[in-house]
Image: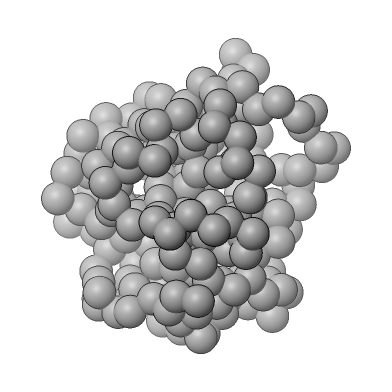
């Protein structure tokens, strides 16, 4: 098993999730910043430092991750069945008690994004900016920013369950002294302050 180290102490880390809202953002603005991409969202910003996934099916089904084996950064998962030597494994724990404090664990249940946030905390992040954490489809019905088709039907209440998971872990980030904001003012996830991407870049986290 692998354990994260504090490689980014005191820094701002951007978590790039798969919500369609990022299609309207200039992600080139992330250049020279710390970025963790969640699952296929890495396709929107291949220069991400880290790729995190919790769903083992995503790695096994190559149609869901085309080209991911060429990802140049660190790949981390909580899916214990993954035996690829390139992929670093951490243990998954129940998020109901908040984010994991042990560097070899991440808290999550319904969302890989929760694990990615926990990983950023382990890396020493002082503040985290969430991108693509929408918890709802775009007005045109698009569900993801990467455009790949998920072969299984959407589970009823999936976004509601994810929003509840985020709300459950949010207080523990405060206790840890980590500031988290959601860079989508229209997001259905309301447990963290919602600010425009530009404001996150230019005012709050410059």
Residue positioned 39% across, 31% down in the render: 67
Residue positioned 41% across, 25% down in the render: 23
The answer to whether residue 43 of the structure is visible from this angle is: yes
**Image quadrant containing the C terminus:** bottom left
The answer to whether residue 15 of the structure is visible from this angle is: no
Q: Is residue 96 above or below residue 200?
A: below
**Depth check, front residue: 71 or 180:** 71
Q: Is residue 82 above or below residue 105?
A: above
Residue 175 position, x and y percent, is 51, 84
* Number of numbered discs on residues: 0
In the displayed structure, does residue 95 sit left or right of residue 8?
right
**Residue that lies at the very extreme toward the top in this rendered image:** 140
In the displayed structure, does residue 165 sit left or right of residue 194?
right
**Depth check, front residue: 114 or 104:** 104
Residue positioned 32% across, 42% down in the render: 71
In the displayed structure, does residue 82 sit left or right of residue 161?
left
**Residue that lies at the very extreme toward the right in this rendered image:** 156
Residue 33 position, x and y percent, is 20, 53
Tell me where residue 154 sits by quadrant: top right
Residue positioned 53% across, 71% down in the render: 90
Q: Is residue 198 above or below residue 206?
A: above
Q: How is the image coloured?
A: one colour
Residue 1 position, x and y percent, is 50, 76
Q: Is residue 166 above or below residue 29?
A: below
Residue 156 position, x and y percent, is 85, 37
């Amino acid at each position: 098993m692998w354990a994260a180290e504090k490689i980014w102490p005191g820094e701002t880390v951007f978590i790039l999730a798969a919500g369609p809202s990022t299609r309207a953002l200039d992600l080139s603005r992330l250049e020279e910043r710390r970025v963790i991409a969640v699952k296929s969202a890495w396709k929107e910003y291949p220069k991400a430092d880290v790729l995190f996934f919790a769903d083992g099916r995503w790695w096994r089904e190559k149609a869901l991750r085309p080209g991911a084996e060429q990802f140049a950064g660190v790949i981390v998962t909580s899916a214990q069945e993954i035996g690829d030597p390139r992929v670093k494994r951490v243990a998954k724990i129940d998020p109901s008690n908040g984010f994991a404090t042990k560097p070899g664990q991440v808290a999550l249940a319904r969302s890989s994004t929760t694990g990615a946030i926990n990983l950023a905390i382990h890396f020493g992040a002082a503040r985290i900016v969430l991108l693509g954490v929408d918890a709802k489809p775009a007005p045109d019905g698009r569900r993801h920013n990467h455009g790949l088709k998920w072969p299984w039907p959407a589970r009823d209440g999936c976004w509601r369950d994810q929003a509840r998971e985020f709300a459950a872990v949010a207080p523990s980030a405060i206790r840890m002294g980590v500031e988290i904001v959601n860079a989508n003012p229209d997001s259905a996830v309301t447990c963290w302050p919602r600010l425009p991407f530009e404001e996150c870049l230019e005012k709050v986290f410059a």
